[in-house]
Amino acid sequence: MKKILAFLLLIISVTVQSQTTALKEKYQLLPFGSVKPSGWIKEQMQKDMAGFVGNLDQIVPSLINDPIYGEGRLQKHSKAKDLGNLKSGDAGGDDQYKWWNSETQSNWWDGYIRNALLVNDTKAIEKIKKYIDRILATQDADGYLGIYDKELRYQFTAENGELWSKATLYRGLLAYYEYTHDQKVWNALLKAINNVMQHYPIDHSDPFNVGKGFSGGVAHGLTFTDVLDRMYQLTGNKKYWDYALFLFMNFSNNFTSEKDVQLKSIFNPDYKLQSHAVHTYEHLRPLIVAAYASGNNEMQKALEIYLTRIKNCSTLTGAAIGDEWIGGRTANSTTIGYEYCSIHELMNSYTVLLQKSGNPQNADAAENIFYNAAQGSRDPDHSGIAYLKTDNSYEMMGTKNGDVEAGRNQTRYKYSPAHQDVAVCCNPNAGRITPYFIQSSWLKETDSILVAALLAPTVVNTAVKKIKLSIEEITNYPYSNNFIFKISPEKNVRFTLKIRKPDWVSNIITKEKYSVENGYILINRIFKSNDSVTIDFPTEVKVREDNNHEKYFSYGALVFAMPIEATAIKGKIYVADFSDWIYKPMSNTRYSYVDSKQAYYENGKIIVSLKNQNNNSIEKTVLIPFGKTILRQVSFK
Ligand SMILES: [Zn+2]
């Protein structure tokens, strides 16, 4: 077996490097800011800007103000920083704490920049301009824009954050540039990326060869391919994709503590996902980019195998095991949790695959995560999110549904604006998820085909055949399934409006002439100023089964759950209105599934008869959207 595997990997290495016909991307991402939120999503983003997304620098000032990219760059004798966390359940040792603030800051700024620009928060935009000037001023003359002093950079033999601190920072800079076309930001990015490519030359360096110790930061650094992928899309220069492929192959061939995405793991039929979950799901993107950049069939196969493995780790709300190592397990709605970071990373990986492949299944997966798991990990009453959450959530008192984990002071199952006692990773990512979702909601296929790929209340501004137009998607989706697309071209123009047909849609109501192709509804006609398209997807309650044959109820894109009343208890107070909250259940009654016959939908709720396990009586119960619950039962045996 081992010999066959080694031979196979040799073949892949040879063919990957010799075959240079990249695959064509099916859809193009529009420049950041072309798609703006409206309706309930915009309101939620504004709430987030008034909440922890807009105020994280007040909530954990020492982490955000650490001048780690500037005069506080890491040197040979830099000590690990006190980040105010308990270090409980961290396997990585002290070296990772040195670079952590770069991730916290840059992921937070990335989300902050994107939210502020999308909701046009003028005060925040002023603050962003100052931040951009400050961060660009740290760039060295040779282009280096990162967290290490000259004596350390690009010559590591152990855990480090060289590429990771850059990936997180440059993603935010790219968004800012795409929105503002600020040339000084573009020039800084070109120089900074060039600096990496010079010091880790393609095919003649070994950036992921860092010994046999824990190397979580190095493994995160593989997502530098996010930056390279976008640079390829913005410039059309294949050197960025070639370099991304080089990074992926170099990662795949070296020792790492996060080996799920390595080709030898993927092509080993007995292998089960086991790495730190966030790594596993973010690494889907470098694999996608490598598969497209190489055009290699074996890489396509690897991608299919990897996706199937992730599906087996996914719960009914689309989130996947992430508490925090996967450890060869399969998903479970009650006993296995997921981290907010992993929710974002997996959703973002599906949106990238949607853009490149056009396969609408990836849109269904992204919508499921965004509208169910991600919404269901937010505190509906206070500004905060759960670091860890389970689908069936019977208590949020720090620990998981009554479990006491041996040797671990578990505090992740609660709501917080920062989660500083664990790590300030999830809250920054909670600020990123919505703008990333919005950006992928409208894609372009050709100059005359526009695609509503993820359904959401949005406004897109773009052009077809060089004629400017805006389309307002008026909807309360996924809380209703009716859409009005208000289309305003500058002059009459024929083009195709392509609307994704979600997997649950069986009935399409519209006055338009349309065809359905590969999961999309195509409307091709001449659109005039003040034109509109109305489309409805009537549906009914569906009873579904998760991987463990537990039943659950959905209506359209939404999963519904039975809320469990809880007492809210205030925890640590950060500043003024920002504090942790834990939730103690007021009832421990569980329910079982009876049959599907009486389930019906009424005014945003599902009414269904379920069996009370305490007294075996059949009770009429009310289920509400999963995303609006705190404690809940969502799956029924
Ligand atoms: Zn996290």
Image: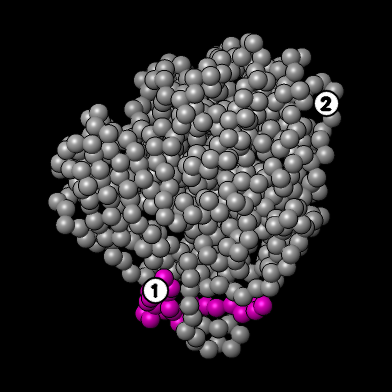
Q: How far apart are marks 2 and 1 (CA)?
A: 59 Å
Relative side of 572 to 106, left or right: right
Amino acid type of disc 1?
Answer: Asn
**Residue 439 in view (yes/no):** yes
User: Which residue matches tag 1?
Assistant: 603
Amino acid type of disc 2?
Answer: Ser
Residue range in magenta is 585-609
Which residue is pictured at 30% across the width and 44% down the height?
A: 471
Where in the figure is residue 360, as x and y percent of width and height? 34, 46
Where in the figure is residue 555, as x and y percent of width and height? 39, 66
Secondary-structure class at tag 1: loop
Residue 538 is a magenta residue? no
Residue 155, placed above or below residue 332:
above
Which residue is pictured at 70% across the width and 62% down the height?
A: 581
Where in the figure is residue 16, as x and y percent of width and height? 45, 21
Mark 1 C-beta closer than 8 Å to ligand 1: no
Relative side of 79 to 616, left or right: right
- Observer-nearest residue: 339 or 499? 499
**Residue 339 in view (yes/no):** no
- Observer-nearest residue: 605 or 297? 605
Check disc 1: other Cα within 10 Å, few if <14, some if 14-19, many if 20+. Answer: few
Residue 381, placed above or below residue 493:
below
Where in the figure is residue 164, as x and y percent of width and height? 63, 30
Residue 603 is a magenta residue? yes
Of labels 2 and 1, earlier in sequence is 2
Residue 219, placed above or below residue 35:
above
Which residue is pictured at 64% across the width and 55% down the height?
A: 384
> Residue 262 falls in which quadrant of the image?
top right
Check disc 2: other Cα within 10 Å, few if <14, some if 14-19, many if 20+. Answer: few
Which residue is pictured at 41% across the width and 70% down the height?
A: 604
User: Which residue matches tag 2?
Assistant: 78
Relative side of 196 to 179, left or right: right
